[in-house]
Amino acid sequence: MPSLAHALAGWSGRGPRGSRGLFRSTFFVTYLLVFFLVGTDRSPKSPSPLACRKGFWGPVPALQNPRSRRSCHMDVQLAPLSLMGATQRVHWLAYSLAVAAIGCDAQSTGPSRSEGVIAFGECVSGLSQIVVARTDGGARRQITTNPFPSWFPAWSPTGDRIAYVYEAPAGMQIWVVNADGTNNHALVTLGNSLAPSWSLDGSRIAFAHKTNVADGFKIWLMDADGTNAHPLTPDSISAVDENVPRWSPDRQHLVFTANASGLYEIWVADVATGADRRALTRAYHDASLAANIEQKVPAWSPDGRMIAYWSGVEGTDPRPNLPRDVWVMNADGTSQRRVVSGDDPNWSPDAQTIIHSLGSPSGPVLGAVAPDGSNARTLFGVNACRPLQSSWRTGD
């Protein structure tokens, strides 16, 4: 699976002690007794209401079942009550009592279907198209049917449009499409453009752009309808390459990657003039690895507190087991720390989860992890044929 960095060059808690813990434990044991004493209804016409894939009945597979439903943070497939036999209804009643008693402390391996929709690029008949899916990989829906590759989607703040990169024969362009696939049209067609990012109010889009092939990309801004396109800093050095801009939630700054020092680092600049800019990270040469450690693909958290980014050795170095990881830092560049192995990070709308691309024996997958490195898990597999950049919005 090509990375964007390369392309650009069970139960988590314990119940409380005391009477409340005893109350929970009593109901939980009651449920287990009912489950094993009553037995399981094997009728093929009455599917089990407790087809669990996690918890007491075994591990969760790496790739989530797209059709699975979740209840109370447990990975459970539920049959409608009308289809349950009498025995199964007893199971469900006991299960419900147990869940109420334990306070829903059991944690799932991934977000529930109610937590939103992720857009990404996926190969369809050999071409990358914009596809959306629930956070468990279910309800996959192809948005674009373009004749050339389409990737790097970015949801608008209202969730009704997706900006993305379209690889037209004349060059990479920025297009936008409605969430239902209608009104698919170009915003920027001249030169080459990458990495669209919406301002929080949806009025403007930042992107990377260059007109001359020999020049580096530069950060540009435009209105959401494609008008008033202009560089963030008109007099920037042509050889310096800037890419992957992301807005701060207050719309006052942009974070991006740039090789102004000779190696790629994470930079921040004010939107008003582009002049107040500074590096937040420091790239360096690691003599023990005989490789440069660079930083790319930043993503500002929706609450404005943190910036996630990729750090490591470029994919052009074929050696295995080199550092290629997702990191986070405070928005001012302090407290830089590794989170998990992966690439192309982005955020959940509530800023509680970082999604990222990851290789696996079965192919590319979207992974998720908390910013502190806990609860790392696989969301679903993607048949990617372009860098697996993703974008997450709320709603169904």
Image (cartoon, grey):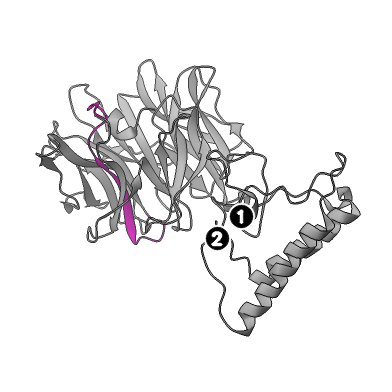
Q: Is residue 100 left or right of residue 178?
A: right
Out of 158 and 330, give the one closest to the viewer: 330
Residue 365 lies in magenta, yes or no?
no
Residue 38 found in image quarter? bottom right
Would you say the residues marked 2 and 1 are in contact, meaning their CB atoms lie under 8 Å apart? yes
Q: Give the alpha-carbon distance from disc 2 to disc 1, as whole Å.
A: 7 Å
Q: Is residue 184 left or right of residue 28?
A: left
Q: Where is residue 323 in the image (x, y as percent from the top left)?
A: 25, 40
Which mark sits nearer the N-terminus, 2 or 1? Answer: 2
Q: Farthest residue in the right direction?
A: 86
- Circle count: 2
Vertical placement of 271 versus 236: above or below? below
Q: What residue type is labelled 2?
A: Trp
> What range of the chain is rendered magenta?
301-319
Q: Position of residue 223 (x, y in %)?
A: 39, 42
Residue 302 lies in magenta, yes or no?
yes
> Mark 1 = which residue?
55
Q: Position of residue 75 (x, y in %)?
A: 63, 51
Q: Mark 2 packing: few (<14 Cα in 10 Å), some, or many (20+)?
A: few
Out of 271 and 216, give the one closest to the viewer: 216
Q: Which amino acid does label 1 sit on?
A: Gly
Q: Farthest residue in the front direction?
A: 37
Out of 269 and 48, give the one closest to the viewer: 48
The N terminus: image quadrant: top left
Q: Which residue is drawn at 84% across and 60% down?
A: 90
> Mark 2 = which residue?
11
| Label ID, residue 166 | none
Out of 17 and 258, give the one closest to the viewer: 17
Vertical placement of 142 versus 298: above or below? above
Is residue 88 in sight in this rendering?
yes
